């Protein structure tokens, strides 16, 4: 038999509101999306995690970052893996940029994440989002310049033959 505390319930739990949420639309959920990011995306390494990221095509729904987590069995038992995911979710919730390019990000933690201080994890995630945003805006610029170049064939110079 479990003991219950009278006049206590979980109904009064305060839910995060506004920018401090991590809505379903901001998460990577489908296996195909994870595979696409792993196969076609780029990587960013940090001390206690690896970030895989891929810019979404303009036709895909949603804006901003969609974030997913993978924690393999090699990192520990279920309790340790779930603790890693909870810590990562909270760090992402606190640092997720509101105005970010449309991209998918998969965060793959290392075993050192369990021993790391939470403020260090938050700073690491924040810094990774800054680096990813810079790399995505730099890589998008050459593509837009290529679209603005005139197409067509050049006429050969008179004395080139």
Image (cartoon, rainbow, N blue to C red):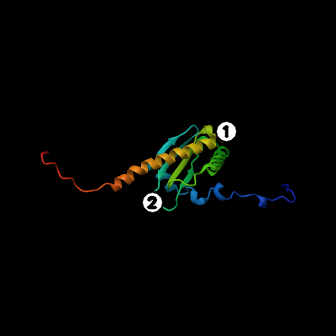
Question: Is residue 148 visible from the viewing direction of this image?
Answer: yes
Q: Where the C terminus falls, by quadrant? A: top left
x and y, in percent, of residue 142 in the image: 38, 49
Which residue is found at the position 61% from the left and 58% from the top?
A: 23
Lateral position of residue 160 relative to residue 107, left or right = left
Lateral position of residue 6 relative to residue 47, left or right = right
Outermost residue toward the right?
6
Q: Return the disc, 1 or 2, that comes first in the chain's sequence.
A: 2
Which residue is found at the position 18% from the left and 53% from the top?
A: 155
Few, some or many residues within 10 Å of mark 2 (<14, 14–19, 20+):
few
Q: Nearer the viewer, residue 73 or 102?
A: 102
| SS type, badge 2 | loop
Question: Is residue 41 visible from the viewing direction of this image?
Answer: no
x and y, in percent, of residue 113 in the image: 62, 40
Residue highlighted by disc 1: 117
x and y, in percent, of residue 73 in the image: 59, 44
Q: So how many labels did they put on this image?
A: 2
Q: Where the N terminus falls, by quadrant? A: bottom right
Residue highlighted by disc 2: 58
């Amino acid at each position: 038999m479990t003991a219950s505390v009278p006049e206590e319930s979980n109904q009064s739990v305060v839910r995060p509101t506004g920018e401090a949420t991590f809505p379903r639309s901001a998460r990577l959920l489908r296996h195909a999306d994870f595979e696409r990011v792993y196969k076609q995306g780029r990587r960013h390494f940090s001390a206690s995690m690896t970030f895989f990221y891929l810019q979404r095509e303009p036709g895909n729904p949603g804006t901003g970052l969609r974030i997913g987590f993978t924690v393999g069995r090699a990192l520990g038992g279920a309790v340790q893996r779930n603790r890693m995911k909870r810590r990562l979710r909270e760090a992402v919730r606190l640092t997720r940029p509101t105005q970010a390019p449309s991209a998918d990000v998969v965060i793959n933690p290392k075993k050192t994440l369990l021993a790391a201080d939470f403020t260090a994890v938050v700073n690491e995630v924040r810094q990774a989002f800054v680096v990813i945003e810079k790399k995505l805006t730099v890589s998008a610029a050459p593509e837009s310049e290529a679209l603005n170049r005139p197409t067509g064939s050049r006429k050969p110079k008179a004395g080139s033959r």
